[in-house]
Image: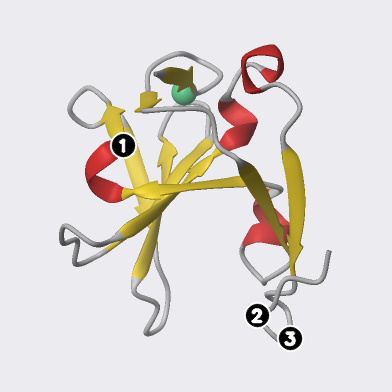
Amino acid sequence: MLSASCHCGAVQIEVPRRPRALTNCNCSMCRRYGVLWAYYRDKDVRLIAPEGAIDDYSWGRNTQRFIRCKTCGCVMQWKKHAVDAQSWTGVNARNFDPEALGDVRIKLLDGAKTWKYVG
Ligand SMILES: [Zn+2]
């Protein structure tokens, strides 16, 4: 198990294991957030937040919501609006302790144009 928190500590997130790779995406959202995504099954990720501690953002016909701490603004996770047992979720690996994360490969996703991995 690996856990992380936002900067102020109000919101925590737990994942079952270290990610094998991280995704650095340059889509309109990710490049602004400056996040690195670790992907898991939604059911394996636990977001722990007191009532009212989180906010989220979605836009247009997007099916995901980007969840952040209301106090310090750290982006914690993206989640599908409609979650089922097969759903994937992205956890922002920037919130993990870099030492706990270790030497993880970072893959580049061209979300700006092709939605393909380019490195
Ligand atoms: Zn916070």
The spot of residue 80 in percent (x, y) is 30, 63
Quarter of the image that includes the N terminus: top left
Quarter of the image that includes the C terminus: bottom right
Instruction: Tell me the element at label 3.
Output: loop
The spot of residue 40 in percent (x, y) is 40, 47
Q: Marks 2 and 3, how far apart in space?
A: 6 Å
Residue pointed to by mark 1: 45
Mark 1 Cα shell of 10 Å, populated few (<14), some (14-19), many (≥20): some
Give the residue at x 74% y 74%.
Answer: 110
Instruction: Tell me the element at label 2.
Output: loop
Mark 2 Cα shell of 10 Å, populated few (<14), some (14-19), many (≥20): few
Amino acid type, callout 2: Trp
Identity of the residue furthest to the front in this view: 20
- Asked if one can make out residue 79 in the rendered structure from this viewpoint, the answer is no
The spot of residue 60 in percent (x, y) is 41, 82
Residue pointed to by mark 3: 113
Amino acid type, callout 1: Val
Amino acid type, callout 3: Lys
Tell me whether circle 1 and circle 3 mark residues in contact (CB < 8 Å).
no
Nearest the viewer among 9 and 22 is 22
Which is nearer the N-term, disc 1 or disc 2? Answer: 1
> In the image, 18: left or right of 22?
left
> In the image, 77: left or right of 55?
right
Tell me whether circle 2 and circle 3 mark residues in contact (CB < 8 Å).
yes
